[in-house]
Each structure stands twice: as structure tokens, then as C-alpha cells.
Image (spheres, grey):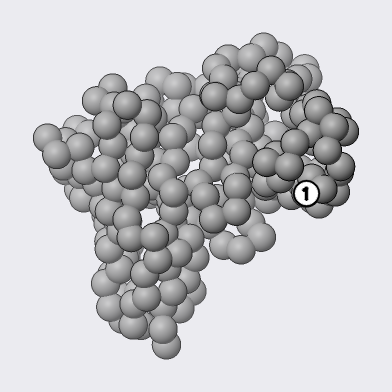
Amino acid sequence: QQQVKQSPQSLIVQKGGISIINCAYENTAFDYFPWYQQFPGKGPALLIAIRPDVSEKKEGRFTISFNKSAKQFSLHIMDSQPGDSATYFCAASKYSSASKIIFGSGTRLSIRP
Amino acid sequence: ETGVTQSPTHLIKTRGQQVTLRCSSQSGHNTVSWYQQALGQGPQFIFQYYREEENGRGNFPPRFSGLQFPNYSSELNVNALELDDSALYLCASSTRGTGELFFGEGSRLTVL
């Protein structure tokens, strides 16, 4: 019940296209769903996060879509840019203990110029 | 605002040795969490410290231990190193009860 499953493992998108990464979770007690971005040689950095009281959250070119009944959520990157090339991790936790976060296995995103 | 800093950045040990990794938390943060990130994998939660006490632990054996100091900095100690302990060890600080983790750049441990 602690797993977070992420797909695809790798993704290549043309500049200006839409990048979509999907995640599924099992533990219905989870109520905090962040996405982290990691560049080579760096630690992960929070990109955007959602609580299950909303079905969508948008920040600039980044959007999280959340489907509570299906226990799935996804990250959409609009107008993808070469600078978005990084590894993206979805994650889940109980907000009250949000430091104990369960991460997905990651998606390596490459944006082709 | 000072970010999370970790030391050393890289180190090489041999099987059976012991290692200590250090972390200075971001200013104003009172909680430190440690994660292990194997190559090509997502970070895995090791444990969390709050007010100098362990406050939650992942699926790691007792040879992984830690400390948090009054200034909220922290150490991760690993005894009897095994080859599979080779990984990037990430420290993250946060404020208790909030969601966002602030990660350092990690300490890359290689066990030969």
C-alpha cells in the first residue's frame, strides 16, 4: 500500500510540445501529492503539489491533474522547453507527516530543440 | 536564506567500514529527513528527526542511524557498509506540519 507507480520511465518531447507523466498510488490515506524536478548532480526540488480537495492545479506551464476515485495523478508540461530536460518524480504522503514522502521511480524527460 | 548543505559531496569506502554524513538544515527549519537514492531510482525514506529525536523510519536496518543537534543540523551514520549501500544520500529540511521538503545536493557514497 505504500507504492507510488510512475510512467513512463523516459520521455522524449519536441520543443513546444506537451509532456505528460502519470502516477498511481495505493494508499487512500495519502492526501498530499507533490512533483519534484531533479537535474543531474542536484537534489530534487519541489515543482508543484496538490491536495485531493481539487482536481487540477496550474502554475505557469505546469499542471497537475488529480483523479481521486482512480487514485491517479499526472503532470502536464505545456510548451516544453529544453531547460525542462530533467528527471521528474511524483510522490505522495500524508500531509500531517509530509516529510515522510514516498517517491515514484522517476521519469527522465528530454526536450528536443 | 541559507539552503540545505551536505558534506562530504563524494566519498569512497570499503565493505565493513563505517561512514558519517552531515547536513545543515535550511534556516528556520526544525525537521530533517534523510533519503537514499540509488542510481536511476527515486529517493527512499530512511528516517526523520524532529527535536533531536527520531520521528519515523523507513525500511532500513538498524545499522543506519542518525542524530539531530540543537541547531537542527543532522548526521547519518551507516555501520558495516555493504556494496548495496552505494547511493546518493539526500538530506531534506522542512518545517514540521508543512509539505515542502528542501533537499541538499547529496553525498555520493561508493562502497568497494
Image point (27%, 31%), residue name = A26
Do we see residue A35 in this rendering?
yes
Instruction: Residue A25 in the image: state x and y as whole percent.
Output: 28, 37
Instruction: Residue B96 in the image: state x and y as whole percent.
Output: 53, 22
Image point (54%, 42%), residue name = B43
Instruction: Residue B93 in the image: state x and y as whole percent.
Output: 61, 33
Nearer to the camera, B100 or A31: A31
Dot 1 amino acid type: Thr
The answer to whether B31 is drawn above or below residue A54 in the figure is: above
Image point (44%, 53%), residue name = A106
Image point (44%, 35%), residue name = A102
The answer to whether A39 is drawn above or below residue B86 in the figure is: below
Q: Chain of mark 1?
A: B
Instruction: Residue A92 in the image: state x and y as whole percent.
Output: 37, 35
Image quadrant in which you'd find residue B29: top right
Q: Residue furthest bottom?
A: A113
The answer to whether B39 is drawn above or below residue B72 in the figure is: below
Dot 1 corresponds to which residue? B110
